[in-house]
Amino acid sequence: MIDLSAVHIDYQTVLPELVVTGTIVVVLLLDLVVPPDRRRWLAVVSVVGLAIALIASIPLWGQHRSAFADTMAGDSFAAFFNVLLLAVTILTVLISPRYLRCVHLDFGEYYALVLSAAAGMMLLAAATSLMTIFLGIELLSLALYVLCSFSRLQEHSQESGLKYLLLGGFATGFLLYGMALIYGATGSTTLLGIRAFVTSSPGTNVLLLLGIGFLSVGLAFKASAAPFHMWTPDVYEGAPTIVTTFMSVATKAAAFAAVGRIFVATLPSLEAQWYVPLALIAVLSMSIGNVVAITQSNLKRLLAYSGIAHAGFIFLGILPGTTDGLAASLFYIAAYAAMNFGAFAVVTALDAKGEHADELTYWTGLFYRRPFLATTMTIFMLSLAGIPPTVGFFAKLFVFQALVTAHLWIPLIVGILTTVISLYYYLRVIVVMVTVPEGAPVEREGVGLPMTVVVGLSALGTTVMGLVPQVFGWALQATRF
């Protein structure tokens, strides 16, 4: 008889993940019987399951639960990311049917793959063991590899999935090797055990530092941070636009959830050792992302390099090694989710009409053809640039304030300078949209109610979120491990 008492099985801690997993099974079974012209019902079932999981995440707020031999946590941190990831996934599923029908990719397995990726991201946010961190990363990665190459007849999509698979496998090797070194140095795979070892052993442990370095490579790859960013523009450009919309936000959020738990919650006493590598990643990400974005004529590649730059800004909040700095990063992640998801959703709305909106030249005179989409895109561009009173301004303000409090002047200066550089390419998109086109504007039909609602909600969140102090308060409370 196996004694499971020490494992401390607690299903409430993982109830949101279980609900999403159960929804995956239901969607797969329904796909066997639902006629091809009724596959939108799979989206409805997916949204219902995700909504139930979101509701199940709320009771975790304010809790400090630990389950399954300290490999999973049910706390405010996990609840914060669960709500964020589930909200992004719900919005993605809502706008998927129209797009999938337009590009002839309306297959039931799409919804199962999106739900699988979401489950992996949620697992990663709640993981408090190196093993569960690895499981979460691999679950989300395997689903995204397939989603990136989901357009089976398009060469660019196949290339996108293959590049992501090969480079992702390479990054996984670094991740696993780092975990092995950390286990060899500390004798534990749980974050609690690693923290206890680090606290009780104040000297320099070279094996542990090497493990942390290799682990950082794998996490930086998932966060699209430089110098591990080269896959990002190609994958974002080649993948179906709806997939890019989802992964550009959700993958980054999940990766930074793991970064926060590992570096701020587990290794704050080693801040002097891991500060320089993470600061270098932040500086390189902001510099490379913003400078290279200036040269881009493809909007998906431009937003990809923008995402690399924003990964650097999110890392700025991690550098002080404090919960206040981590709260600034969490707020930045929530802000980035609203404005970047909205920007890609606008591109998806245009692609769903067969307009092939990747190239920036297409956006010339968009204000005269599609005023609603152009107006919301303007809001998203201004927020990504950090223009007040949008949420992007407050997100940058909070991470800069964390750097000032910690007297970290070099990353602060780089952050301010690269923010100024980014104004060029964000405002360039707006200028292109207001440029008067040659000839009369072509009238287009609407983008549909779900897309209108999703884009409108993203624009509303981008406009209002920074003006509601409670949002940062939630981020601050989520960091009270």
Image: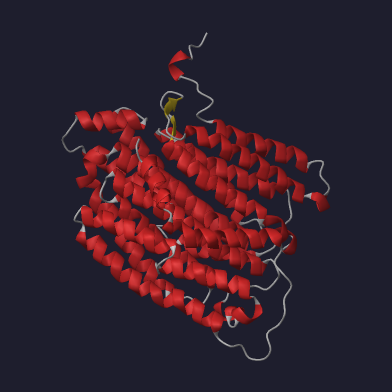
Give the farthest residue toward the left: 203
From what the image shows, is residue 324 above or below residue 464? above
Indicate whether 382 appears above or below 260. Answer: below
| Front position in the image: 310 or 240 | 310
Indicate left or right for 350 with 327 as reference: right
Q: Is residue 352 visible?
A: yes
Farthest-out residue, bottom? 439
Q: Could you tell me residue 481's position as x and y percent? A: 35, 35
Residue at the outermost top position: 1
Residue 274 appears at what percent x and percent y? 25, 47
Query: Who's the residue at 67% across and 50% down the image?
Result: 110
The vertical placement of 415 against 25, above or below, is: below
- Which residue is drawn at the image coordinates 77% and 40% (left, top)? 30
Residue 60, relative to residue 330: is it above or below? above
For image coordinates 40% across by 68% down, the residue present is 388
Give the image's coloring scheme: secondary structure
Q: Which residue appears at 25% of the width and 61% of the height?
A: 411
Q: Position of residue 328 (x, y in %)?
A: 35, 52
Residue 359 is situated, as x and y percent measured from the top left of the image, at: 57, 76
Numbered label tally: 0
Whether residue 226 is visible here, answered yes or no, is no
Instruction: Answer left or right for 102 relative to 286.
Output: right
Q: Nearer the viewer, residue 52 or 237?
A: 52
